Amino acid sequence: MARRKQNPKTVLVAAAALGVLGLFCGLVIYLVMGNFSPIAKLPEFPVQSYMDGGNLWSEEDYALRGKVENVLLRSDDRTKYLVSIRPRGSDFLLPVLLEPAKPRTKPVQREQKLLLQVHLGPSGEVRCTAYE
């Protein structure tokens, strides 16, 4: 049986097609990861200032990226949670009250990485109204 000779052009076309497909997949993953979400466009929560007892505006919304270290309390209907969050790039643990406007079907769990939209409550507590 005779061997087919491979054309270098077809190999280059196949490599280019795979490269374009890889770039497309990377773009889709970038968009899905929430970099274009409305929460990601908010200013970062000033963790150090909050821990030092600094004055923050209670009406302003902030973005807080972090990992759920522990779920401390939950409401009976499982729509509100008190969790401890370790902000990204920080050694502190923040107690955050999760009470999203649209309750999710999946509960919050330990070691989950979240992007939260937070603001300060009337007595200085960190309240989350939306998360991804």
Image (cartoon, rainbow, N blue to C red):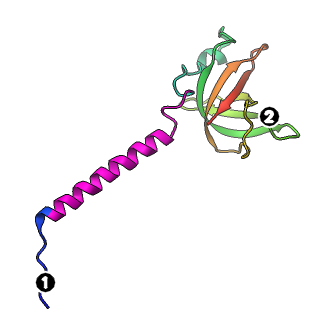
Q: Quadrant of residue 44?
A: top right
Vertical position of residue 48 compared to residue 79: above or below: above
Amino acid, disc 1: Arg
Name the side, left or right, on which 128 lies relative to 6: right
User: What residue is pinned by disc 1?
Assistant: 3
Amino acid, disc 2: Lys
User: What residue is pinned by disc 2?
Assistant: 80
Element class at badge 1: loop
Give coordinates of residue 24: x percent, y percent.
36, 47
Q: Residue at x 57, y 27 (%)?
A: 39
Magenta residues, start to end: 10-38
Q: Residue at x 45, y 45 (%)?
A: 29
Q: Nearer the viewer, mark 1 or mark 2?
A: 1
Vertical position of residue 18 compared to residue 131: above or below: below
Q: CA distance from mark 1 to mark 2?
A: 68 Å
Name the side, left or right, on which 4 lies relative to 103: left
On whether residue 100 falls in the magenta region, the answer is no
